[in-house]
């Protein structure tokens, strides 16, 4: 069976893949500026709620999975492995939805003159 540390790392990777895509989307869609603080995670999720409340909830839920995998020592290896698989699936759903939303945002071209 897969190790706990490996599964926990996969959960973290899934979360950060989705979070970084979400943050980039927020920069594009809202002009969001990175704060370089831990508050960024909640801010990005809140901004996503303007476009799709379910997307915001999914990102928040995925972050909770990441935190559980990293900090909840009473979780069994089996639980962490299952959460890692669910995290991967949820990250893919989040990224797909972000791509759909990004396609609806008008692109502003800058005039070089």
Image (spheres, grey):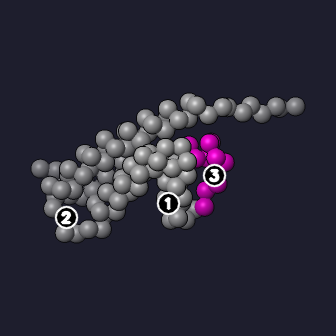
Q: Is residue 52 above or below residue 103?
A: below
Quadrant for the C terminus in the image = top right
Do tag 3 and tag 1 residues touch (Cβ < 8 Å)? no
Q: Quadrant of residue 88?
A: top left
Task: Provide the secondary structure element on which disc 2 rests.
Answer: loop
The local crowd at label 3, few if under 14, some if 14 to 19, many if 20 or more residues have their Cα within 10 Å, is: some
* Residue ID for mark 1: 42
Q: Is residue 23 above or below residue 99?
A: below
Left or right, 88 with respect to 33, comes to left
Task: Provide the secondary structure element on which disc 3 rests.
Answer: loop
- Percent across and percent down for residue 6 are 25, 53
**Which residues lie in the magenta part?**
24-35
- Percent across and percent down for residue 85 are 25, 45
- The residue at the point 36 percent across, 53 percent down is 62
Label 3 – label 1 distance at C-alpha: 13 Å
Instruction: Using the image, tell me which numbered label, if any, was put on residue 32.
Output: 3
The local crowd at label 2, few if under 14, some if 14 to 19, many if 20 or more residues have their Cα within 10 Å, is: few
Pointer 1 or 2: first along the chain: 1
Label 1 – label 2 distance at C-alpha: 24 Å
Instruction: Using the image, tell me which numbered label, if any, was put on residue 75.
Output: 2
- The reply to whether residue 42 is visible in this rendering is yes
């Amino acid at each position: 069976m897969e190790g706990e540390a490996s599964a926990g790392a996969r959960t973290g990777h899934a979360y950060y893949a989705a979070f970084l895509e979400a943050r980039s989307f927020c920069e594009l869609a809202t002009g969001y500026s990175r704060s370089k603080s831990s508050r960024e995670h909640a801010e990005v999720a809140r901004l996503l709620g303007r476009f799709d409340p379910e997307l915001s909830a999914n990102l928040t839920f995925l972050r909770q999975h990441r935190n559980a995998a990293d900090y909840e020592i009473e979780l069994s290896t089996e639980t962490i492995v299952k959460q890692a698989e669910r995290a991967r699936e949820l990250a893919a759903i989040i990224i797909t939805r972000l791509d759909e939303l990004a396609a609806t945002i008008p692109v502003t071209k800058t005039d070089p003159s």
